[in-house]
Amino acid sequence: MKNKKNIEDTSGFDNIVSLTKRRGFIFASSEIYDGLAAVYDLGPYGVELANNIKKEWWRVMTQLRDDIVGLDAAIFMSPKVWEASGHVKGFSDPLTECRKCHSRLRLDTLLEEAGVFADEKMSEEEINEIFSKNKEKVVCPICGATDFTPAKNFNLLVQSNLGNFTGDWQKEPVYLRGETCQGIYVNFKNVVDTTRVKIPFGIAQIGKAFRNEITARQFIFRTREFEQMEMQYFVKPGDDKKYFDFWREARFQFYLDLGIKSENLRWHEHENLVFYAQAAFDIEYNYPFGFKELEGIHARGDYDLSVHAQASKHDLSFFDSQTQERFLPHVVETSAGVGRTMLAVICDAYKEEEINGEKRIVLSLAPKLAPIKIAIFPLLKNKPELVNKAREIFNSLKLDWRCEFDDNGNIGKRYRRQDEIGTPFCLTVDFDSLDNDDVTIRFRDSMEQKRIPLRELKNFFQNNI
Ligand code: ATP
């Protein structure tokens, strides 16, 4: 290939963010009204990428297994769920305010950035004590000042006035769910009673969650409305460790199978566990702003089922008919974010290259994740015989793959556009195609071109996507 070289250190985060906007992956929510902080919309290619990530997760977590079933619980749940789960009292982050610029910030994050150990599970007293000992190290990322108010716990649940027509909804709020897994716990008995599941088994769910996050930085990494892919695996007490280790390995492999480079993934073990947890590990991805949580894997014991059993007065134990034992299952949870996975695969796939003195931007996405699998071009727009043949091929391939037809501009420009949205294959119909019944396939990463007979096209794509 001609004179192709990688440009070092130009793939900064700003360039990646700019590509996602320019090419229709991610837009600020309500942008024509100046946006809404920490809320984003998915554009035409973003929704395809997100759907492909979710499809792959669902395939691996349900279709390929005989011990996991799916669920789609509602976003609104009884407020009693969030009281029993501990979210109303304890789902909070330590909020501090910069006395100079009045930015509201998370103190645990500021301390961590200053190299001081802290996390959001610490009590107000604990974290303020650490803060007072390290005051001079904590710097406002917005204005550089070092003068902050003491931290207060700020609850992250988002309230709604659903159904409360006459009362004071702030006193009796219904919440938008703060995590999807509560829908799984409260449906545990329904699933056991209506399907043939036997312990150990899992329930998987993909859906929206909402959190009043204090800091709205880092693009789609931390948003106030986001999608989770969560699976709760119910095991016999004592089997926790075995399945925790299994799921740690399986979930790490998932990201490698999405094509993410292994050197950009690592484990982080939580040292400060909540009282009921037996173990908690995060899979972290090396985002342009550092290694940060992509997915959490948690051994949660019987905490969730026992609090809901107690508060609802329903027996949530499981009877094992083989061993004639009755027990409250323990939970191993895997909890991932769609947005964070999307951002990780985009950052990992983003490349800038120089080709004959010109910059080329490429998203080297795994073909299974690429929003468009095949772009189909007639060489010239004003030659009906080429356009008709290309349309015919588009109409045939679209039955199996997400394709795009494009007859606008010169071929070089059409290639660049597809490179930037990560399309692995471009197919061109030229004059030789009319005589020989073949087309040119151009490969995104190597830019090599190959002629392929029409009758072999479907086979070719079946083997390569
Ligand atoms: P963090 O410490 O970064 O706030 P968390 O520990 O609160 O994350 P969990 O409650 O374990 O996150 O949620 C599980 C997953 O959901 C996370 O690993 C992440 O992928 C995703 N997630 C959580 N909060 C957000 C958010 N505000 N925006 C986007 N994704 C999120």
Image (cartoon, rainbow, N blue to C red):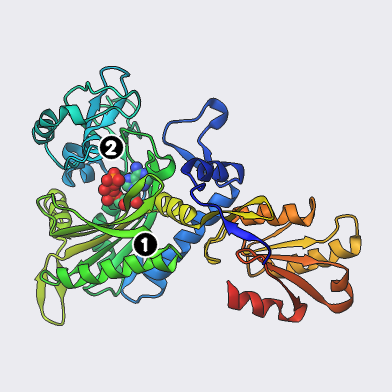
Residue 153, given in percent of the width and then of the height, sits at: 18, 32
Taking the image as drawn, is residue 64 in sight?
A: yes
Q: Are marks 1 and 2 in contact (CB under 8 Å)?
A: no
Q: Is mark 1 within 8 Å of ligand 1?
A: no
Residue 120, given in percent of the width and then of the height, sits at: 20, 41
Return the residue at label 2. 157
Image position of 73 (left or right of 44): left
Residue at point 27% right, 27% down? 170
Find numbered disc 2 in the image and state the secondary structure of the residue it sits on.
Answer: loop
Disc 1 crowd rating (10 Å Cα; few below 14, some 14-19, many 20+) is: few
Residue 359, given in percent of the width and then of the height, sits at: 64, 50
Find numbered disc 1 in the image and state the secondary structure of the residue it sits on.
Answer: helix
Which badge, 1 or 2, is on the more N-terminal residue?
A: 2
Given residues 90 and 423, the one toward you in this image is: 423
Image position of 433 (left or right of 446): right
Q: Is residue 208 above or below residue 251?
A: above
Q: Quadrant of residue 164?
A: top left
| Mark in the foreground, 1 or 2 | 1
Given residues 17 and 80, the one toward you in this image is: 17
Image position of 293 (left or right of 463): left
Given residues 339 and 181, the one toward you in this image is: 339
Taking the image as drawn, is residue 171 in sight?
A: no
Identify the amino acid type marked 2: Leu
Tell me the quadrant of the picture where the C terminus can be found.
Answer: bottom right
Return the residue at label 1. 263
Q: CA distance from mark 1 to mark 2?
A: 35 Å
Residue at point 14% right, 52% down? 271
Residue 122, given in percent of the width and then of the height, sits at: 13, 40
